[in-house]
Each structure stands twice: as C-alpha cells, then as structure tokens.
Image (tube, rainbow, N blue to C red):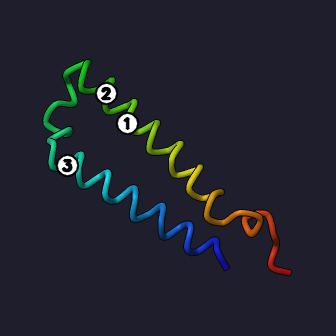
C-alpha cells in the first residue's frame, strides 16, 4: 500500500521542480549551451531523486506482486 504514496510523492516533487523551472524561465533560454547543460543536470538529479524517493518510501512493497 506504500506504492501509491510513493508515486504521489514523486509526482508532487517533480511538479514542484517543474514549476520552479518554469518560473526561472528555462524555456526561454533553451538555445544557450550553459542553460541547456544546467537544465540537463537538474533533470538528471530530479530523476535520481525520484528513483531514490520511490524505493525509500515504497520499500519492500515495490517488489511484491498482488496475486
């Protein structure tokens, strides 16, 4: 039962990061190589945090099948 909670936490975290990136104006600077590199690093870090959050919250429930 922890898996839906983990997915919700990931969605909220990713949404907040996306909102902050929109406020900063990342979309207006996509042609600048430094902004593109910085944004790529941020996306990679967000992905890693999402995976870590999922397994930290879901724990062993992530590996169980509902049979």
Please give the name of the residue rendered at 20% of the width and 24% of the height, measured from the top-left corner: 31
Residue 38's mark? 2
Q: Looking at the picture, does residue 40 appear above or below residue 61?
A: above
Pointer 3: residues within 10 angstroms few (<14), some, or many (20+)? few
| Callout 2 touching callout 1 (CB < 8 Å) | yes
Q: Looking at the picture, does residue 64 appear above or below residue 23?
A: below
The picture places residue 8, in percent across and down from the top left corner, at 48, 70
The quarter of the image holding the N terminus is bottom right
| Callout 1 touching callout 3 (CB < 8 Å) | no
Give the spatial CA distance, label 2 vs label 1.
Answer: 6 Å
Residue 21's mark? none
Q: Circle 2 sits in a helix, a strand or a loop, which is it?
A: helix
Q: Which residue is mark 3?
A: 22
The picture places residue 55, in percent across and down from the top left corner, at 65, 57
Q: Earlier in the sequence, mark 2 or mark 3?
A: 3
Please give the name of the residue rendered at 46% of the width and 36% of the height, measured from the top-left corner: 44
Q: Circle 3 sits in a helix, a strand or a loop, which is it?
A: helix
Q: Which residue is mark 1?
A: 42
Q: Nearer the viewer, residue 24 or 28?
A: 24
Give the spatial CA distance, label 2 vs label 3.
Answer: 14 Å
Pointer 2: residues within 10 angstroms few (<14), some, or many (20+)? few
Q: Earlier in the sequence, mark 1 or mark 3?
A: 3
Please give the name of the residue rendered at 37% of the width and 36% of the height, measured from the top-left corner: 42
Q: Please indicate whether residue 16 sits to the left or right of residue 5 in the image.
A: left
Q: Circle 1 sits in a helix, a strand or a loop, which is it?
A: helix
Q: Quadrant of residue 46?
A: top left
* Identity of the residue furthest to the top in this view: 33
């Amino acid at each position: 039962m922890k898996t839906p909670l983990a997915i919700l936490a990931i969605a909220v975290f990713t949404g907040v990061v996306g909102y902050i990136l929109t406020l900063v104006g990342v979309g207006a600077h996509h042609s600048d190589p430094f902004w593109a590199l910085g944004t790529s690093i941020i996306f990679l870090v967000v992905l890693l945090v999402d995976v870590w959050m999922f397994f930290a919250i879901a724990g062993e429930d992530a590996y169980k099948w509902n049979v």
